[in-house]
């Protein structure tokens, strides 16, 4: 079929489907260019693997081509004649307890996020940690994880980690460091440690805090500072403002009927995000009474995942959030002054009035969440509103702070910088973190740190801070060392190592702190155990210790809930900063690499950022009008996207950043994600993106006004997965309002017809026994991407790099597509939908009939099997796949040589080579394991026993896998829901994965433009 | 003009065209047979090992059960190769001065593993599970041959896919009672087909031939 013919046909289908899609009255678009019907984009969308599918840009002539092909065929044939190389088996000398080759063990521990624990179970294959799962017994996890926790495995095996203890770049033994510290301490003893400073990140570890406090007791003039670049200063300050004490606030979103987020992204940020996703989505499942569905309003100054989830989203500029918060507080009568200079008639005032009415209509079941990066006043206002709405004790809970020392970290860092500047510091010990890179630009931290006589850095990488320190101590990774930490609700987890440090000189923070104690050679294990022996773990310490290690949580009574009273104060009066001229800039941690610490993590670098779908880069995000004003143009070609570089000036500082247009971004403001622009991250992260820290000051850490931007004329290449794998306007995502759903629960079926089951030329296949299937709830999916990294980790999926990603050759077996509906010119009308997409395991699989070597065939349980050892790489299957979920190894993407990566891989899954097609298998290794285990035990496979990697990671429980032949199984019951529809089922592919259509719960009183 | 070629050339050319076909088919047959031969599959080739461990002596002579050493065969994908500790259970008492066993003692002394050469080596894209087979009445010797008669271990079958599929398609030809799985001297009865058919039904054996059964 010629190109034009294909085009015409697809246009016909397109038109028909759009016509069919009319009843729900929505059309979805993936990018602004697609909406504007940019011919270049349309051309690209028609192509399979953009460009290279039709262009063979190799100047080799026909004869030479035939010669080469002949020779390579002959050589390929010859290599097939070799015998298998001899392999060795290396058994244990004395086997450790419970280690059975071929059966992984799981150990409970925790990974740290911003210092807070998230409980995990780590899969270990004969001592090699290979995969992270959530710990169902841990309150911050409930069995799920986020993308960053999944990527901790790669962080452990990162070959660029610091491997040796160095002093001024020369390798030294640990004893030499201890001697050096001893003499430094002896010199400081008469001064009571007046010249000693410790700088840590947020510390929740009781043991580490105990060590630091013991040190400070011995050296009272020494100081302990904390700095977390994406820290929670505002949370602490807001609580102080409202209650006079730094209490910790927790929300029960499963008990909330109405939620208002004041620039709070509870999906991506904070120590409880995984838990909050679970709680929130539990009210959006539509399994019982549809009226039980909660409603979410968000006010936000940059598009976030919480905003994408919202029923009503109000984009405002950073300077206006406080104003809106104040208006809501005044509206509910929380004792604050209203501050709408625009007056009562404005649409925004109407929006706020409707929200206020809704909040007041739900006393005791409404909750207002202030953003972690908002001002303390917004937090105080939210506390006052929550108190007024009667949510305290029902949807909002207060507890004593979890952090060991809840200080104002920015003030703490400023104090340290000032002390260093005046030469008062003679020994600085940086325990983790990278302050030279992350400190606010105006502190001039690097230059001031150079004034310290002795500088020590403990870090996973020899990073920007290590470069300026005398001693660089390689840090033992969280999966290599003993420690402990507390979760958002105070639950303690003992962190146990899964493997001895890969690099023998690696030390944990506890072991480094021991160097400043009377017992410098103490091991991390002894330090943590000693602490808990003193603290007590029940009547029998050994028993309590083993139980805590096994469970991953330390049993104990929960901290007594506090019920502090809101004190009136300055914050009740309007103090909104006058909106200056020029652009406003919001600073946020990067959605994937966070504050820069994961910059060298290829899984996270290649993970498309949830809303922008950018990879390997950060950008100055802006709304379409602002971009038009700046003259930004974005071109797409076969190598990716080309965008304009803008120079952003703010307070005498400037950075050059690629511009990126984000629908729904408030106009006249920019969002800059910090974390990129690393200079010493490693082979993956160095040189990627621009450094937004260069504009971030201690006075305005989260937003600043008065920025100027101008187009430089320079162009920058961006690898964005946004327009790849477009769905050509078919009814891919289907959604309705709650009202429409109640009127017609089967609304999703009206978008497209589903052909009868017998409409096929092939003989019908009956699936006896199991028939595996999946149901994905679009109403629950929050777009957090945890499933993608879980899949990468489980299935040994390679990282391909920016260049290849730009060409559309990323290898992810599951992707999360993002669709918009609404008018980009009216951002408050925008609705965002996420759609996780894996291989649909079609029963009438179009890929199978075109494979010339039968490398992809159907299994008796309905899986669309992919046989790598048969695949010859024709890519016909991919061309014929309507979902574009097949991935081809254009090059040898796997790193076969780096020794640490060999440890990392899942031994249950083949490591694919060049020239092979691959795709989602429904985690067939897990199916086989469960099947064999069940057979060995003489029982049927239980429903829920098999969890695919994506399902297990999903905090929203949006993905459910199981046997569709079993009518009682959860997946079968979900598929029986009227919302359930098959994606592109009109093509008669009979997909085994189906979707539950999205239902939003808009407030009829809110005008949507 | 006289003929350039003699009349007999006609016959010769016909013969050679006909012969070429046979030659090509013959070459194909030879290739396939070589590919199936022990030269390629290593079937029947005894491998050299760091210690000349004799299954003939330990299994045939002493009657040690397979599971004494291959401990995980009933529960895991791999049967498990014994740790040095297992050897030393006996050999710290008997033959404890034998020079042949010095590598074993050295391993135990120095805490360094003995590196055995893999005998039954499947390609890396094949995921075989021992427990799934031994629990369904597939005897050890069905695949591994009479190990009690092997002084040095050799692969007893080709381990090629057609060999696997033979049993997966006709399990009734091979299964034995679960109680006999570890009996090395087990001989299938004359009415194996009747017994096998009964056992397949009794054990609920559903052999699968889908690709993802073994490849993933």
Image: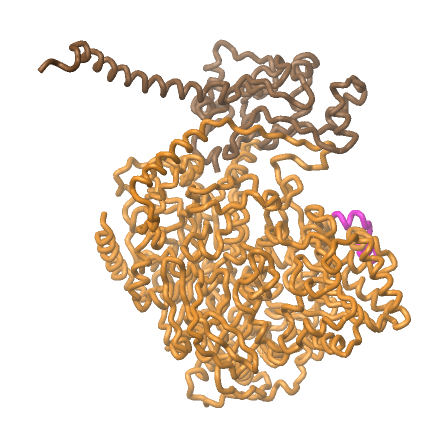
Residue at point 52% right, 38% down?
Answer: A941
Percent of width and height locating residue A138: 64, 55
User: Residue A449 is drawn in which quadrant?
Assistant: bottom right
Task: Looking at the picture, tell me which residue is in the foreground, A775 or A191.
Answer: A191
> Which chain is depicted brown?
B
Q: Main secondary structure of the magenta part?
A: helix
Q: Is residue A573 left or right of residue A778?
A: right
Task: Looking at the picture, tell me which residue is in the foreground, A280 or A524.
Answer: A524
User: Residue A93 is drawn in which quadrant?
Assistant: top right
User: Residue A930 is drawn in which quadrant?
Assistant: top right
Residue at point 76% right, 23% down?
Answer: B102
Q: Is residue A326 above or below residue A681?
A: below
Percent of width and height locating residue B176: 53, 18
Task: Looking at the picture, tell me which residue is in the foreground, A362 or B56.
Answer: B56
Q: Is residue A900 in sight in this rendering?
A: yes
Q: Is residue A388 in sight in this rendering?
A: no
Question: Which stretch did the figure color magenta?
Answer: A530-546
Quadrant assignment for the N terminus of chain B: top left
Q: Residue A259 magenta-drawn?
A: no
Percent of width and height locating residue B109: 79, 30
Picture colour scheme: by chain
Q: Colour of chain A?
A: orange
Percent of width and height locating residue A355: 48, 78
Q: Is residue A718 above or below residue A985?
A: below
Q: Is residue A63 left or right of residue A445?
A: left
Q: Residue A540 magenta-drawn?
A: yes
């Amino acid at each position: 079929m010629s190109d034009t013919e294909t085009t015409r046909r697809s246009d016909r289908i397109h038109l028909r489907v759009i016509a069919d899609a009319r009843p729900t009255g929505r059309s979805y678009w993936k990018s602004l260019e697609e909406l504007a019907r940019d011919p270049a984009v349309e051309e690209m969308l028609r192509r399979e693997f953009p460009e290279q599918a039709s262009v063979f840009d190799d100047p080799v002539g026909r004869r030479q081509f035939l010669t080469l092909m002949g020779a390579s065929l002959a050589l390929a044939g010859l290599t097939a004649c070799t015998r298998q190389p001899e392999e060795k088996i290396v058994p244990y000398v004395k086997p450790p307890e419970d280690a059975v080759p071929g059966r992984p063990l799981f150990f409970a521990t925790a990974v740290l996020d911003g210092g807070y624990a998230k409980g995990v179970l780590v899969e270990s294959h004969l001592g090699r940690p290979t995969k992270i799962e959530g710990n169902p017994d841990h309150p911050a996890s409930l069995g799920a994880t986020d993308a960053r926790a999944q990527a901790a495995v790669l962080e452990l095996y990162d070959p660029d980690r610091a491997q040796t203890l160095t002093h001024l770049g020369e390798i030294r033994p640990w004893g030499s460091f201890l001697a050096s510290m001893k003499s430094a301490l002896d010199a400081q003893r008469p001064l009571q440690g007046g010249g000693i400073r410790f700088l840590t990140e947020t510390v929740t570890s009781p043991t580490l805090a105990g060590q630091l406090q013991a040190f400070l007791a011995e050296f009272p003039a020494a100081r302990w500072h904390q700095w977390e670049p994406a820290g929670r200063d505002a949370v602490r300050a807001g609580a102080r403002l409202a209650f006079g004490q730094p209490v910790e606030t927790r929300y029960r979103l499963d008990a909330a009927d109405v939620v208002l987020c004041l620039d709070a992204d509870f999906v991506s940020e904070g120590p409880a995000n995984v838990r909050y996703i679970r709680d929130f989505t539990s009210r959006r499942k539509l399994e019982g009474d549809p009226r039980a569905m909660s409603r979410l309003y968000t006010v936000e100054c940059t598009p976030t995942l919480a905003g994408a989830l919202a029923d009503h989203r109000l984009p405002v500029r950073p300077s206006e959030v406080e104003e809106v918060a104040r208006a809501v507080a005044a509206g509910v009568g929380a004792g604050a002054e209203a501050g709408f200079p625009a007056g009562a008639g404005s649409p925004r005032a109407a929006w706020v009035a409707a929200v206020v009415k809704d909040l007041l209509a739900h006393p005791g079941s409404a909750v207002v969440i202030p953003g972690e990066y908002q001002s303390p006043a917004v937090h105080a206002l939210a506390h006052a509103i929550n108190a007024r709405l009667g949510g305290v004790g029902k949807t909002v809970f207060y507890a004593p702070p979890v952090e060991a020392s809840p200080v104002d970290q920015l003030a703490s860092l400023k104090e340290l910088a000032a002390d260093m500047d005046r030469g008062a510091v003679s020994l600085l010990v940086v325990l983790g973190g990278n302050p030279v890179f992350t400190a606010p630009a105006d502190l001039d931290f690097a230059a001031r740190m150079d004034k310290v006589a002795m500088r020590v850095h403990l870090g996973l990488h020899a990073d920007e801070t290590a470069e300026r320190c005398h001693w660089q101590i390689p840090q033992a990774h969280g999966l290599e060392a003993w420690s402990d930490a507390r979760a958002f609700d105070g639950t303690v987890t003992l962190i146990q190592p899964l493997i001895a440090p890969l690099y023998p000189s690696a030390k944990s923070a506890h072991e480094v702190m021991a160097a400043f104690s009377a017992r410098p050679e103490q091991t991390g294990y002894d330090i943590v155990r000693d602490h808990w022996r003193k603290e007590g773990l029940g009547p029998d310490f050994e028993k309590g210790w083993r139980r805590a290690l096994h469970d991953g949580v330390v049993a104990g009574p929960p901290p007594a809930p506090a019920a502090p009273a809101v004190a009136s104060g300055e914050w009740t009066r309007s103090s909104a900063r006058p909106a200056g001229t020029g652009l406003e800039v919001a600073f946020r941690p990067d959605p994937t690499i966070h504050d820069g610490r994961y910059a060298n993590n290829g899984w996270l670098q290649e993970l498309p950022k949830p809303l922008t779908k950018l990879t390997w880069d950060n950008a100055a995000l802006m709304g379409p009008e602002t971009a038009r004003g700046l003259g930004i143009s974005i071109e797409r070609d076969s190598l990716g996207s080309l965008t304009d570089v803008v120079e952003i000036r703010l307070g005498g500082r400037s950075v050059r950043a690629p511009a990126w247009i984000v629908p729904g971004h408030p106009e006249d403001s920019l969002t800059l994600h910090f974390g990129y622009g690393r200079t010493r991250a490693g082979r993956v992260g160095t040189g990627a993106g621009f450094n937004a820290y260069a504009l971030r000051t201690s006075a305005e850490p989260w937003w600043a006004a008065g920025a100027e931007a101008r187009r430089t004329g320079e162009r920058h290449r961006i690898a964005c997965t946004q327009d790849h794998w477009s769905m050509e306007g078919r009814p891919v995502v289907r959604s309705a309002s709650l009202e429409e759903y109640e009127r017609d629960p089967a609304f999703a079926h009206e978008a497209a017809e589903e052909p009868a089951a017998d409409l096929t030329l092939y003989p019908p296949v009956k699936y006896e026994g199991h028939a595996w299937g999946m149901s994905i709830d679009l109403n629950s999916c929050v777009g957090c991407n945890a499933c993608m990294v879980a899949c990468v980790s489980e299935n040994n999926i390679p990282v391909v790099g920016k260049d290849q990603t730009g060409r559309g050759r990323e290898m992810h077996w599951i992707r999360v597509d993002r669709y918009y509906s609404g008018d980009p010119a009216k951002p408050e009308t925008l609705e965002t939908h996420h759609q996780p997409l894996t291989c649909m395991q079609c029963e009438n699989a179009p890929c199978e009939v075109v494979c010339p070597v039968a490398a992809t065939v159907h299994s008796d349980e309905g899986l669309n099997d992919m046989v790598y050892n048969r695949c010859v790489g024709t890519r016909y299957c991919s061309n014929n796949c309507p979902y574009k979920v097949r991935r081809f190894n254009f090059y040898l993407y796997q790193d076969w040589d780096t020794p640490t990566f060999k440890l990392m891989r899942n031994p249950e899954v083949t490591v694919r080579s060049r020239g092979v097609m691959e795709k989602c298998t429904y985690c067939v290794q897990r199916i086989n394991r469960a099947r064999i285990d069940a057979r060995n035990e003489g029982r049927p496979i239980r429903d829920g026993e098999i969890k695919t990697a994506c399902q297990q990671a999903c905090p929203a429980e949006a993905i459910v896998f199981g046997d569709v032949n079993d009518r009682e199984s959860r997946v079968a019951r979900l598929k029986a829901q009227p919302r359930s529809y098959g994606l592109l089922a009109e093509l008669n592919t009979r997909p085994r994965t189906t979707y539950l259509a999205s239902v939003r719960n808009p407030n009829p009183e809110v005008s949507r433009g | 003009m006289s003929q350039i070629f003699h009349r007999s050339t006609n016959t010769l050319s016909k013969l050679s065209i006909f012969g070429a076909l046979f030659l090509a088919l013959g070459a194909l047959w030879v290739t396939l047979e070589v590919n199936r031969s022990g030269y390629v599959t290593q079937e029947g080739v005894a491998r050299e090992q760091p210690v000349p461990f004799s299954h003939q002596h330990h299994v045939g002579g002493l009657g040690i059960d397979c599971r004494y050493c291959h401990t995980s065969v009933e529960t895991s994908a791999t049967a498990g190769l014994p740790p040095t500790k297992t050897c030393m259970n006996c050999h710290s008492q008997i033959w404890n001065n034998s020079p042949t066993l010095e590598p074993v003692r050295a391993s135990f002394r120095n805490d360094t593993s003995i590196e055995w050469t893999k005998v039954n080596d499947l390609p890396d894209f094949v995921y075989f599970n021992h427990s799934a087979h031994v629990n369904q009445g597939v005897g050890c010797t069905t695949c591994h041959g009479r190990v009690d008669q092997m002084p040095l271990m050799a692969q007893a079958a080709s381990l090629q896919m057609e060999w696997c599929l033979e049993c997966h398609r006709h399990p009734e030809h091979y299964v034995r009672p679960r109680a006999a799985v570890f009996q090395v001297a087990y001989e299938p009865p004359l009415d194996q087909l009747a017994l096998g058919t009964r056992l397949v039904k009794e054990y609920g054996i559903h052999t699968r031939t889908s690709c993802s059964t073994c490849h993933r």
